[in-house]
Amino acid sequence: MKQLLVLRHAKSSWKDSTLRDFDRPLNKRGEHDAPRMGRLLAKLDLVPDQIITSAAVRAESTAEAVAANCGYDGEILATQDLYMGGPDDYIALLNLVPDSNTRVMVVGHNPGIEDVVEGFTNHWYRMPTAALALIQLDIDNWQGIDLATEGNLLNLWLPKEI
């Protein structure tokens, strides 16, 4: 069994209209929510073995804040592939995860994040900023994951509810 944590980036700022979408930072709410989700992971003993994030500023900042607050001490893999990425992009990256990693967290954007959760659970869930889903996957190795892999949603945390 493997576990997948699916996290949408925390709330970003639209204050500087000269920035490209890719370069938008977190706003104050995002800077508050991202560490909070990390503390939740620590409290629930759900620290990931690996974190893969979109390289967009807001997603990478979210991943770094979560990692710092949950006790994650590994490297964070930041990739352009998850910026505007769909389920196929997430699957391709998960196929490269070493099997020694039981729990992996991916950090990305909508609509890709919602599509990934729906793809594994066969149910659509709203994923607002900083929403975190925990999906149990009935697989033994990450190379075996594909779009037909069925998962069980164990929990969905929304920052407003914790």
Image: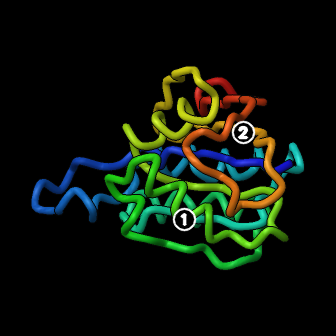
- Choose the circle earlier in sequence order: 2 or 1: 1
Check disc 2 and give the amino acid type.
Answer: Leu
Residue 3, percent from left and from top: 77, 48
Front position in the image: 68 or 144: 144
Residue 150, percent from left and from top: 69, 34
| Crowd tier of the residue under label 2, counting other residues whose Cα lies within 10 Å: few below 14, some 14–19, many 20 or above | many
Front position in the image: 112 or 75: 112
- What residue does disc 1 label? 93
Of helix, strand and loop, which one carries label 1? helix
Between the residue at mark 2 and the residue at mark 1, the CA separation in whole angstroms equals 18 Å
Q: Are marks 2 and 1 in contact (CB under 8 Å)?
A: no
Front position in the image: 97 or 129: 97
Residue at the limit of the structure toward the left, as seen here: 18
Residue at image x 52%, y 40%? 116
Which quadrant would residue 161 be assigned to in this image? top right
Of helix, strand and loop, which one carries label 2? strand
Residue at image x 44%, y 57%? 89
Front position in the image: 16 or 23: 23
| Crowd tier of the residue under label 1, counting other residues whose Cα lies within 10 Å: few below 14, some 14–19, many 20 or above | some
Residue 25, percent from left and from top: 35, 59
Residue at image x 39%, y 48%? 86
Residue at the limit of the structure toward the bottom, as seen here: 75
Residue at image x 76%, y 75%? 73
Disc tally is 2
- What residue does disc 2 label? 134
Which quadrant would residue 23 be assigned to in this image? bottom left
Location of the C terminus (image quadrant): top right
Check disc 1 and give the amino acid type.
Answer: Leu
Q: Relative to 124, is 1 on the left or the right?
A: right
